């Protein structure tokens, strides 16, 4: 077994593995693999063949500390049960910690995988509150649409979030903006709030919603409803969001691994 960073010649095989494991489109696999430079993709190889991989090249910042995001972790089916994923994650975390990183965040693809990530040393769980909101018509509700650029994402989230939020690097926000708009997402903005949403057949799905009050969040949703003709929104909010208090249910979303155990044993992300 050999652990190494990816080379340009590995990219085609990495994309193929992504599609095989995650059942995503070729377009999305292209985006995922291009999310970071090849040296941000780590591989386990057996006889020069890829056995496992992790995409770990997206930098994050929170509480004045630097971290990184695990965008994809996968093991080729015939190599499962050998502990390659755990060995790979431990190795990458050691390398990142020695380079000044304090934490990493992973988003398990499904709820059943949270226990798997616990076995990899991930401890603190970040929850989202999810719910459905009926939107009443308001002809006077207005917003600016699709004007949020990469440089504005961080500014908007910082302005309206009451708690510390996790931020990407500048390059990470550029990739985030690229993903949002190429995947059909839209943004809406007023002086009182910001929203990132996707249109579904009979509703909108809200991925980010920040506002200085629930009433102004409602106005923002009403402006989106006037634009899209949808009168229902599936929303997800941070666990400690003050918007729509008492509505929705908590669901596990991401997990955090603290690389500096001595200093950050109690580090939490809300």
Image (spheres, helix red, strand yellow):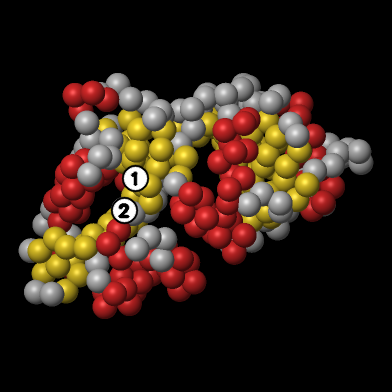
Between 65 and 44, the residue placed more toward the observer is 65
Name the residue carrying label 1: 68
Would you say the residues marked 1 and 2 are in contact, meaning their CB atoms lie under 8 Å apart? Answer: yes
**Is residue 179 in view from this perspective?**
yes
The answer to which quarter of the image holds residue 114 is top left
Who's the residue at 72% across and 46% down the image?
188
Who's the residue at 40% across and 28% down the image?
63
Between 264 and 214, the residue placed more toward the observer is 264
Who's the residue at 34% across and 40% down the image?
67
Residue 33 rendering spot, x and y as whole percentages: 38, 65
Residue 29 rendering spot, x and y as whole percentages: 42, 68
The answer to which quarter of the image holds residue 212 is top right
Give the side of residue 48 with respect to residue 232, left or right.
Answer: left
Name the residue carrying label 2: 56
Residue 151 rendering spot, x and y as whole percentages: 58, 48
Q: Is residue 156 above or below residue 64?
A: below
Q: Classify mark 1: helix, strand or loop.
A: strand
């Amino acid at each position: 077994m050999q652990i190494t960073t990816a080379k340009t010649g590995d990219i085609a095989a990495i994309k193929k593995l992504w599609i095989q494991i995650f059942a995503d489109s070729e377009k999305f696999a292209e985006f995922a693999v291009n999310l970071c430079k090849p040296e941000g993709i780590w591989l386990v190889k057996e006889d020069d063949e890829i056995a496992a991989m992790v995409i770990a090249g997206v930098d994050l910042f929170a509480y004045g500390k630097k971290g990184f995001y695990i965008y994809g972790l996968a093991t080729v089916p015939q190599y499962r049960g050998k502990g390659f994923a755990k060995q790979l994650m431990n190795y990458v975390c050691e390398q990142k910690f020695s380079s000044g990183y304090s934490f990493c965040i992973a988003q398990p693809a499904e709820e059943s995988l949270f226990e798997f990530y616990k076995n990899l040393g991930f401890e603190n769980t970040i929850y989202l509150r999810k719910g459905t909101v009926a939107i009443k018509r308001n002809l006077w509700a207005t917003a600016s649409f699709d004007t949020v650029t990469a440089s504005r994402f961080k500014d908007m989230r910082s302005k309206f979030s009451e708690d510390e939020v996790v931020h990407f690097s500048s390059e990470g926000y550029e990739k985030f903006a690229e993903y949002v708009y190429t995947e059909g997402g839209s943004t809406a903005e007023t002086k009182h709030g910001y929203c990132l949403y996707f249109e579904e057949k009979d509703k909108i799905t809200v991925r980010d919603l920040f506002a200085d009050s629930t009433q102004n969040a409602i106005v923002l949703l009403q402006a989106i409803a006037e634009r899209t003709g949808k009168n229902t929104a599936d929303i997800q909010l941070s666990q400690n969001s003050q918007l729509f208090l008492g509505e929705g249910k908590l669901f596990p979303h991401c997990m955090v691994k603290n690389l500096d155990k001595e200093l950050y044993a109690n580090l939490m992300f809300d």
